[in-house]
Image: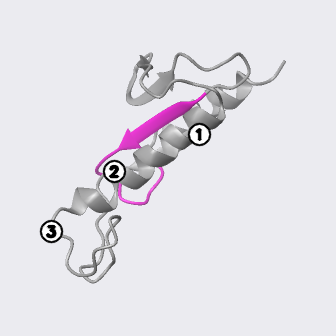
Amino acid sequence: MFVLHGATDTAPENMRDWFGVEGKITTPSLAVYPDARSSRDFWAAQNGCKTATWSAVSGRPECQRNTSCPAGEPLVYCETSGVGHDVPGFAVDEIGTFFSGLVK
């Protein structure tokens, strides 16, 4: 699983926040981090990984690899900022590296 997520998204003021509270979201990160990181942790559990064992991908500080995943069940999580909904420049290379590692 390769997860790529921007860290600077904001939510409309009238959006229901992740805790079910209607109204203005006063902390924009509440609309981003719980969902992206919860998704990362969900896939780690599905793949049989331990959610707390992450290490930086070599040369790519935005990306982390879960080092406790079983063989054949890799999980890489990249979190970016400052690119909005655009694909960051490093994504093509990192996604290619991820998938080429799955080819036997």
Residue depicted at x 32% and y 50%: 7
Q: Which mark is residue 96?
A: none
Q: Of marks 2 and 1, which one's residue comes earlier in the chain?
A: 2
Q: Of marks 1 and 3, which one's residue comes earlier in the chain?
A: 3
Crowding at dot 2, Cα within 10 Å, few <14 / some 14-19 / many 20+, comes out as some
Q: Which mark is residue 43?
A: 1
Q: Quadrant of residue 28?
A: bottom left
Crowding at dot 3, Cα within 10 Å, few <14 / some 14-19 / many 20+, comes out as few
Residue depicted at x 50% and y 47%: 39
Which three-letter amino acid code belongs to the residue tagged 3?
Answer: Thr
54 vs 79, nearest the viewer: 54
Q: Find numbered disc 1 in the image and state the secondary structure of the residue it sits on.
A: helix
Compute the Cα span from label 1 to label 3.
29 Å
Q: Is residue 33 magenta?
A: no
Q: Which residue is mark 3?
A: 26
Residue 68 placement, left or right of 56: right
Which three-letter amino acid code belongs to the residue tagged 2?
Answer: Tyr
Residue depicted at x 72% and y 25%: 100
Verify CB contact (< 8 Å) between mark 2 and mark 3.
no
Q: Which mark is residue 33?
A: 2
**Residue stretch in magenta:** 75-88
Q: Of marks 2 and 3, which one's residue comes earlier in the chain?
A: 3
Q: On screen, 102 above or below 86?
A: above
